[in-house]
Amino acid sequence: MHFTKKEHEKFNKKIYDSFILGGDIGGTNTNLGIFGVKNGFTALLLSFHFKSKELKGLHHAINEILSYMQKNYRIKIAKACIAGAGVVSSKRNSIRITKLGWSISNKQLSKSTGLKKILFINDFEAVGYGINMLKKTDVAVVKKSRKIPKAPIVVIGAGTGLGKTTLAYDGHCKSYTPLPSEAGHCDFPAQSKLEIEVVDFIKKHRKIKQNVSYEQVVSGIGLENIYLFLRRKGKIKPTKYTKEADNAKNKPQVISKYRKIDETCRKTFAIFKNAYAKFAANCALDALPYAGIYIAGGIAPKNKDIFGAGFAKTFEKCHERSDVLKKIPIYLVLNYNVGLLGSGFAGARFL
């Protein structure tokens, strides 16, 4: 939980037209927040963070927050926009959180929490909406190029899974609107002998009978897959750090921790970075995002230095349209709450 004295004063002064609950539910973390709404604009006033797998259900966390708001501020929250890492129904009245196996409907959640209006959106839609709320200090430049205002934006991000959304500028609302996508599940296009070997290993190890997706390479599970491939290949001498990674329950975290001092971990990230840059390039060629590609997700901010000159060079490699890719700027999103910010933005806009 995070709040400041100034934020307490905002509640006491009642300077907002209304308040809504926003949520960003992932396979690893569940982030919830209270937003103040004024003339259609939102401000994140309080945020609450939980480990998803430690929750028995989303309604328990929500009820804790609603009770907190009622007790401390005498404010009753009636509306919520919940973003989740999973498939949202066409009517946006239910969602299935893929990695947690949660199936949540607005009718069910309303009954268990007392919320009156609930909107569900995809987690990467929320990240897309959140781009509208970022400040200059919330992003770092990965690759410089002239940014064209109001041109499309692409947001990608590897974490527990791999997400992507294209943002189109809405002149009426004067903000960007994200388009839903499942691009993280596109086929991984192996080109080199090494990449073909990685794909073959993943197929056998994960017992995949069809094509291997980008998510199996560019994500937390992707890091684990690449690492296990290199260990099985057996050409890199193991160290005490390798042995720790071998036995770790959370392999991606340990691989990241030792990627500068252990050769297997370093090579894992080299393959991962190359695949990440190619995914970014493919998305760029599809949408022509001359206002930029934004890299979000849980892995990037913790491993910022992999997004350097080498990433940009791989991104621009294209036999036919390298000229297009050179014109597209790339930014790294540093704000951990971008998805949560987006859920609040969407809630204020549609509820």
Image (tube, helix red, strand yellow):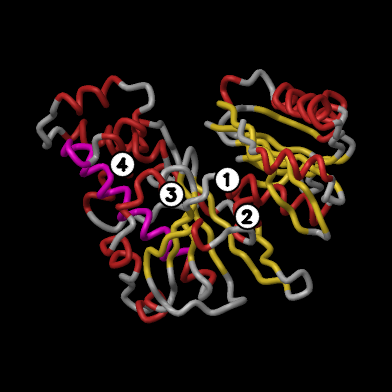
Q: Which residue carries the number 1 mark?
A: 337
Q: Nearer the viewer, mark 2 or mark 3?
A: 2
Of marks 4 and 1, which one's residue comes earlier in the chain?
4
**Three-letter code for the amino acid on which mark 2 is drawn:** Gly
Return the residue nearer the eye: 285 or 18: 18
Q: Nearer the viewer, mark 1 or mark 3?
A: 1
Q: Which residues are magenta?
A: 260-283
**Three-letter code for the amino acid on which mark 4 is drawn:** Asp
Q: Which residue carries the number 4 mark?
A: 200
Calculate the distance from the C-alpha at mark 2 to the C-alpha at mark 4: 37 Å
Q: Which residue carries the number 3 mark?
A: 214
Q: Nearer the viewer, mark 2 or mark 4?
A: 2
Please name the residue shown 44% across and 37% down the image.
209
Q: Which residue carries the number 2 mark?
A: 130
Calculate the distance from the C-alpha at mark 4 to the C-alpha at mark 3: 14 Å
Judge from the rendering whether residue 132 lies leftward or rightward of residue 282; answer left or right.
right
Of marks 1 and 2, which one's residue comes earlier in the chain?
2
The picture places residue 296, in percent across and down from the top left corner, at 49, 52
Badge 4: few (under 14), some or many (20 or more) residues near its Cα, within 10 Å?
some
